[in-house]
Image (cartoon, rainbow, N blue to C red):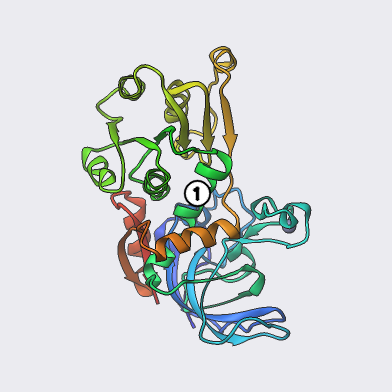
Amino acid sequence: MKAVVFEEFGGSDVLQVKELPDPEPGPGEVAIDILASALNHLDVDVREGVSRFPVEPPFVLGVEVVGRITALGEGVTGWEVGERVMPYLMATCGECEYCRTGRESLCLSAGFISFSTSGGYAEKLACSVRHLVRIPEGLSDEAAAATQIAFGTAWHMLFTRGRLAPNERVLINSVGSGIGSAAVQLAHLAGAFVLGNASSDEKLARASEFGLDVGINYATQDVVEEVMRATDGRGVDLVFEHVGGELFQIGLDSLAKDGRLVICGGHSGEVVPFDIIPFFRSQRQIIGSFVYSRWELEKVLDLAARGLIEPLVYKTYRLDDAREAMETMERREHFGKIVLKP
Ligand SMILES: [Zn+2]
């Protein structure tokens, strides 16, 4: 099979298109022909060797994959050749206390799926059936590939961790990003009043098509001031934070009393100063959030198939053009996911 491999850490120029042996499904596994594979910023960190995950080259990137089953390994039941499937992002043990209680993103032995299988920047993949989710009819391969991480993560943050209620006000940081735009759609669908920020008016205008009620340009406006203006000086009940750095503090300052800030990332600054006094006097909460469960993934795929949310695909590339695809993502000009189609 054809695959995009890197043999040393570095920039996009380390990516090579190579011929690799076809993966054979082991016991409990299936072989999959990959139909579409979405890119993620995690891929850049892994390629550069700064992901803080145990990855060594040679390595095939790609954790967000849609494919069709082509062969069943020994002992596989309940799955058929020809079914369209998606591996859940995490490679979990299925047996620890977290797996057994529906919190598999916290699995004691988890890694991302591509760490134990080969990745999605390829024509084929073999993986355990324990990780598979069926893809509903009515959802294209590209749209399905664009659904998992953005909407799964946003669902877990907003509803499972953040406990967003229909009458609440929520501030979504960086609405132009994959999970930011997904969060706008889900929060709107849930009946919340949705405020959001971005670095440009174009991104805010685009997000307003998906349910953003109040857009704030953080390059030209004071976010906290605008949040207070839009909420009669009260602040928001929930902040959806995934950026880090300044936006973390801005998020805290935008909260109402008893408000919650849910966070899943810190690309723009992983270590931040923190003022304890206003935090406890206003009885606020900061809630960590990591990935999502397979059950949550099935929910968002269903919403996408029913047309209630719209997975955003910015552009598709052939496998041969994976380098160009990654460079497009790294320039951060895109609105929506970048997808490879073998
Ligand atoms: Zn486990």
Q: Residue at x 38, y 72 (%)?
A: 138
Q: In this view of the protein, which residue sits in the foreground, 202 or 77?
A: 77
Residue 282 in which image quadrant = top right
The residue carrying mark 1 has its beta carbon less than 8 Å from ligand 1: no
| In the rendered image, the vertical position of residue 173 relative to residue 51, given as above or below | above
Answer with left or right where residue 288 lies relative to residue 17: right
Q: Residue at x 42, y 66 (%)?
A: 144
| In the rendered image, the vertical position of residue 333 relative to residue 89, given as above or below | above
Q: In this view of the protein, which residue sits in the foreground, 209 or 316?
A: 209
Answer with left or right where residue 124 lies relative to residue 75: left
The answer to whether any part of residue 283 appears in the image is yes
Which quadrant is home to the C terminus?
A: bottom left
Residue at label 1?
Answer: 155
Indicate the position of residue 249 as horizontal and vertical percent values: 46, 24
| In the rendered image, the vertical position of residue 108 relative to residue 319, given as above or below | above
Q: Secondary structure at mark 1?
A: helix
Q: How many marks?
A: 1
Indicate the position of residue 240 as horizontal and vertical percent values: 46, 37
Residue 32 in which image quadrant = bottom right
Indicate the position of residue 260 as horizontal and vertical percent values: 53, 29
Q: Residue at x 30, y 20 (%)?
A: 229
Question: Three-letter amino acid code at disc 1?
Answer: Trp
| In the rendered image, the vertical position of residue 56 relative to residue 331, given as above or below | below
Q: Residue at x 33, y 49 (%)?
A: 332
